[in-house]
Amino acid sequence: MDITNIIALGAAVAPASQVEIDQMRQQLGRQVPAQLEDFYRSTNGFITPQGATLYDTASMLERNTTYEISIYCPEYLLVGDDSGGRGFLIRSESDDLAIYSSDLGDLGPEDFEQEATSLQDWISSLR
């Protein structure tokens, strides 16, 4: 995964280990999209100066539990937020690679907005 712009923003951290990725998947108890695992092999999360966050592997279970993702939108994983009340989601078990956003107070998939066609495209769009 190309994280050049995340590095340029000074937001990249060390990659996650395979053990951390496996633990995250086990804790979530569900499939994690390959594109997300690829991302974690490049950097274990980030927060940009503008506040866009992609959660690290250790935070994924807590964030998905807190926002009751398995209840309100069980086909998705909450992978980040904008530090202003909008979450970023990805389908957990689908060929759909798109990144969606939603108000964290209204997590009905019918109201999700597509942000990018893939995690790579979304990451590349961050400034």
Image (cartoon, rainbow, N blue to C red):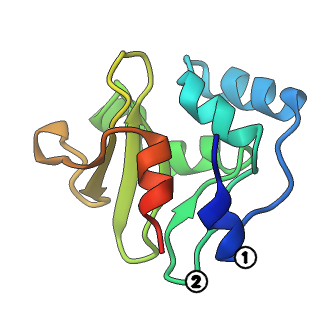
Q: Position of residue 108 (x, y in %)?
A: 18, 42
Q: Quadrant of the N terminus?
A: top right
Element under disc 2: loop
> Residue 78, can we see it?
no
Query: Dividing the picture into quarters, in which one does residue 57 lie?
Result: top right
Contact (Cβ within 8 Å) of mark 2 with mark 1: yes
Tell me if residue 88 comes above or below residue 105 in the rendering: above
2 or 1: tag closer to the N-terminus: 1
Q: Is residue 9 above or below residue 106?
A: below
Q: Left or right? Give the position of 72 relative to 76.
A: left
Q: Horizontally, is 68 left or right of 120 in the view?
A: left
Task: Find disc 2 in the rendering and name its residue.
Answer: 49
Residue at 65% in and 54% down: 3
Callout 1: helix, strand or loop? Answer: loop
Q: Label for residue 10?
A: 1
Q: Position of residue 74 (x, y in %)?
A: 35, 27
- Which residue is nearer to you in this view: 65 or 43? 43
Please provide percent x and percent y for residue 27: 69, 28
Label 2: few (<14), some or many (≥20) within 10 Å?
A: few
Residue 116 at x, y percent in the picture: 31, 47
Q: Name the one closer to the observer, 46 or 69.
A: 46
User: Residue at position x 61%, y 19% from top?
Assistant: 29
Q: Residues within 10 Å of mark 1 (few under 14, many from 20)?
A: few
Residue type, mark 2 in image: Pro
Q: Who's the residue at 11% across and 39% down the image?
A: 110
* Amino acid identity at mark 1: Gly
